[in-house]
Amino acid sequence: MADVVLTEIHGRVGLIRINRPEVLNALNNDVMDGIGLAIDAFEADEAIGCIVLTGNEKAFAAGADIGFMKEFGYMDAYKTDFITRNWERIRTCRKPVIAAVSGYALGGGCEVAMMCDMIYAADNARFGQPEIKLGTLPGAGGTQRLPRAVGKAKAMDMCLTGRMMDAAEAERSGLVARIFAPEKLVEETLAAAQTIADYSLPAVMMVKESVNRAYESSLAEGLLFERRTFHASFALEDQKEGMAAFVGKRKADFKHR
Ligand code: DAK
């Protein structure tokens, strides 16, 4: 059986590829465990500064594996903490994770993309939360992250009708950061990830932590968190190097300290 999750290293970027093309990359425990293990390894590796999660040209992931969950009862789901155990690892990663989405990102696939720090999409990308058509609802953050990304009106529309949003609408609505041609998606995402990975890793982690606060606290609390983190950045060797390099009109040589 082929590995359902593949990894590659490109410079300071760790690439994770979901690999179940026969079922449009439907997500099961093996896939989610594989993504978690890959993140564990890239997070522990000092030589990695940014992570990219992708699928193939036809599908990022068409959702959780429907065949696997169709016979589940409430007790099975509750007692085994269904999917939650291995679905939270992307959220807890402290290095930036970029989703590179081509083709379908539906249900759990859309939710996994939204767990990442940002989404770059191919122009053929289709996003949706079609769980309503299956008699259920998004269970991995879709009803929470989608309204934060696209606003209540579009989130309600997507979750209640189960319709798909194309890449242009997703970018217009704030779900997607940038759009590329499908054949350029991974290359361009890796290039952006490399740019991020070449900056000071602790500064990058502070930016990620600080922006995420915007979602989880009031403006006053978020501003205080940002201010304290900004102050803390003056303890970085890389801050001294970055500013000295600017004044000296040379390229900064960050040591990630
Ligand atoms: N699961 C299993 N198999 C899938 C699949 C899925 N989600 N999506 C597609 N496949 C399989 C198809 O069954 C088909 O297999 P064969 O018939 O060839 O054996 C193969 O992939 C190719 O699919 P199609 O023949 O259907 O391809 P089309 O191009 O005609 O259509 C499609 C593409 C994406 C429109 C269609 O496949 C589709 O509607 N797929 C289902 C999309 C969907 O409903 N996704 C949401 C699933 S529910 C949780 C976390 C997450 C979740 C739940 C809980 N917790 C943390 C608690 C998530 C739930 C979901 O995602």
Image (spheres, helix red, strand yellow):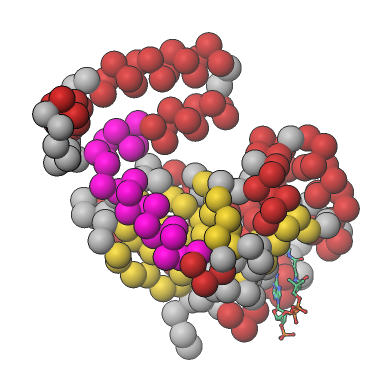
- Residue 101: image location, x then y, percent: 57, 61
Query: Is 68 placed above or below 196 here?
Result: below
Q: Does residue 61 belong to the magenta stretch?
A: no
Count of all numbered marks drawn on residues in the image = 0
Residue beneath the point at 76% across and 70% down: 71
Q: Is residue 207 at all visible to an observer of this figure?
A: yes
- Residue 238: image location, x then y, percent: 18, 32
> Which residue is at the far bottom?
1
Residue beneath the point at 49% across and 19% down: 222
Looking at the rendering, the quadrant in which ligand 1 lies is: bottom right
- Specify whether 183 is left or right of 16: right
- The quadrant of the image that shows the C terminus is top left
Residue beneath the point at 85% across and 46% down: 157
Q: Is residue 236 at all visible to an observer of this figure?
A: no
Query: Is 119 placed above or below 185 here?
Result: above
Residue 113 quadrant = bottom right
Depth check: 27 or 147 in front? 147
Query: Is 100 placed above or below 213 here?
Result: below
* Highlighted magenta segment, given as a residue range: 185-206
- Residue 78: image location, x then y, percent: 67, 52
Look at the magenta stretch and give its main secondary structure: helix
- Specify whether 104 is left or right of 70: left
Query: Is 86 placed above or below 142 here?
Result: below
Residue 77 quadrant = bottom right
Residue beneath the point at 83% across and 57% down: 163
Residue 20 quadrant = bottom right
- Residue 142: image location, x then y, percent: 69, 47
